[in-house]
Image (cartoon, rainbow, N blue to C red):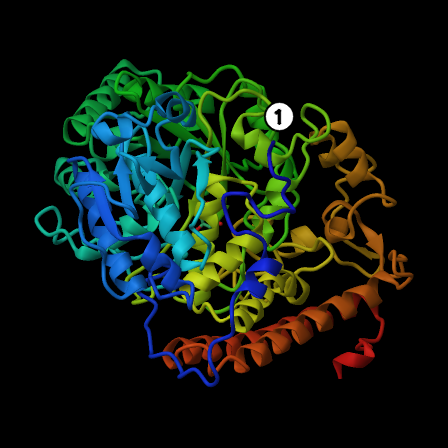
Amino acid sequence: MKPSRREFVATGLAGMATLYARQAPLDGQAPRPASEDGYRLWLRYAPPGTVVDAYRSALRGVLVDGTSPTADVIRAEVRAALTSILGTAPPASTTVDAGTLVIGTPKQSALIHRLGWERELTALGRDGFILRTARVGGQPAIVIAATDDVGALYGTFHLLRLLQTGQPIARLDIADRPRIQLRMLNHWDNMDGTIERGYAGRSLWQWNDLPAKIDPRYVDYARANASLGINATVINSVNANAIVLTPDYLDKVAALATAWRPYGLRVFLSANFASPIRIGGLKTADPLDQGVIDWWKAKADEVYKRIPDFGGFLVKANSEGQPGPKDYERTHAEGANCLADAVASHGGHAIWRAFIYDEDVDPDRAKRAYIEFTKLDGQFKPNVLVQVKNGAIDFMPREPFHPLFGALKQTPVLAEIQATQEYLGQGRHLVYLGTMWEEFLDADTYAKGKGSTVGKVLEGAVVPQRVTGIATVLNPGLDRNWCGHHFSQANWYAAGRLSWNPEIPALQIADEWTRMTFSSDAGAVKTIVDLMMGSREAFVNYTMPLGLHHLIGGNHYAPMPQNAKAPRADWTATYYHQASTDAIGFDRTMRGNQAVAQYFPPVRDQFDSLATCPEMFLLWFHRLPWDYKLKSGKTLWAGLVEKYHEGARQALAMQKTWGSLTDKVDPQRHKEIADRLAVQVADAQKWRDEILQYFQQFSKLPIAPPQEAK
Ligand code: BDP
């Protein structure tokens, strides 16, 4: 039976209450931890407390039974981790004694083969694993077994997570597999070393030094990803420079692919649709032109010669100025199929982004992709996947789920989520997105009746999908701590965990991450986890509550509700909030522009009716007078005032809470986070004041702060 979302996943933590109770507090005044720079992410392998004694007696030797680059990776990781967690690494064994950790595949290891687990392992798939206490050659041992050695690597990281989070390992019986096949990252790195919407320094990829020099950081990047089960990465921006497909660059990409292969990480590339013109010397990029078809085929062959396990192309076409099939009056299906055909014989995929919003399709940007892509369902080749952002506009702090989830019956759909925090405080605000993605993945599409959650749609459990996937836009850079804000690392972590299993609770993920990243001190963990769990709602409250969206300008950071001038109307703020003296909000109901009709009937009706529309989406779907009565009995204006004040107050409380952790968190990270929280507090007040003052011109009502906010 599947664990319900509200319980901790069986393979994860035993339950917070028991966990906190089990851990003895650290003795008296524990010394303040030594400074850290955050480079090691959640792979710090700090000893998790007194439980280490039990680990020492349970782990007395290590036998990684196999020879392959991945087996070497496992050996090195286990050695480094156990040395750090246990104080000294248990010896590498060649035979099994009591307490030997045995890791391998039935194919390579006779010991594992003799356990007779093949059928069970096959059912878990290539990436699944068993982590079990068992007798091996008559000796009690811990076994990590998988069909493929990458599965064994995932199992190894699972055990290391249990150790880092202080879990009991006396009787292990875990069989786990990913629910999603393509667990993918999308980097938005430009070829000149800058990163689009990157807030942590320049690109990780050192194009000038590649292919000769493999920076050790590439390997640490792969380790971090493998520890979460991330198995695919698109390394260049969707606003793609065609140069990446030239032979010199392909050699560089191949060197990265080679470094990452032992970690199970496959490379994909963003392709510029006009590449046949830009680097191929052709006059056209028309996807039905034979010369173009041949060019892509030859290009794909060239790529696969260097990278035999190349994943395929990701394409942003006819969106925000990018070239695409519509330039030639061809459909998106015709465009996608051309690239898909080129990689098909190699087992590759063409991933076509649905982030397309042509103004001639519909006046409302939120409706456009659904209209275009539902028309094309059934016309895509089998190896085309459509990649859909979580919401219909663009990574807003809160959006209802994109109506395309569950709507395409014959086309595999990947979700695109963004860990980068482009619209969520970028590298400066502490915003944990696990809760946001949980809300998204749990949303019920009703595509096949109740229980058709977005998570289930993505798993292929609602409409069968040929390939399943979740892509996370993640823009780490050369900053020592990878992500700019130390807490942004949690979003990389959460995205990876949810891509493995969309049902892992955000709370569990926050708890794991905190223990691995900061401390195993029960009080500190609880404080940090609480801080994380409330952070996204706080951000929504002080920026865009009650369904407001896009109240920003071009930098996507600061409030700019007055923004009425941009190259296109749907890049302004006024297009979305439509505030006037009468009302505020976007009428997407059946009486308005009928965007709600893009959802399946129960969802359509829920959003359509004021009685049932969740207030968190109120102004997304409804246009309402300032004196509209909220469920609380307050007017809409008073409700808005209250939300903005609440958000600013929450930011202040977060700062205070963090201040209480000086003894529990190392000085460097504590200070760097505290500095950013000071910015966040000031920003939250700025958002509150600027937005309320702006809307007050229309509401003409007093900004009466709730009592406790003073
Ligand atoms: C927007 C970003 C822009 C991206 C675009 C996309 O502001 O930089 O190019 O999305 O996803 O959110 O293509």
Q: Is residue 27 above or below residue 92?
A: below
Q: Is residue 269 in sight in this rendering?
A: no
Q: Residues within 10 Å of mark 1 (few under 14, many from 20)?
A: many
- Residue labelled with disc 1: 407
Side (left or right) of 487 relative to 366: left
Q: Secondary structure at mark 1?
A: loop
In this rendering, would 314 be left or right of 67?
right
x%, y% of residue 53? Answer: 37, 63
Q: Measured from the top left, where is residue 205 in percent x and y? A: 23, 52
- Residue 6 image offset from top left, x and y in percent: 65, 47
Q: Residue at x 23, y 25 (%)?
A: 107
Q: Position of residue 609 (x, y in %)?
A: 85, 40
Asked if residue 319 lies left or right of residue 79, the reply is: right
**Left or right: 296, with 2 as reference point:** left
In the rendered image, which quarter contains the C terminus?
bottom right
When asked about the image quadrant of residue 681, the answer is bottom right
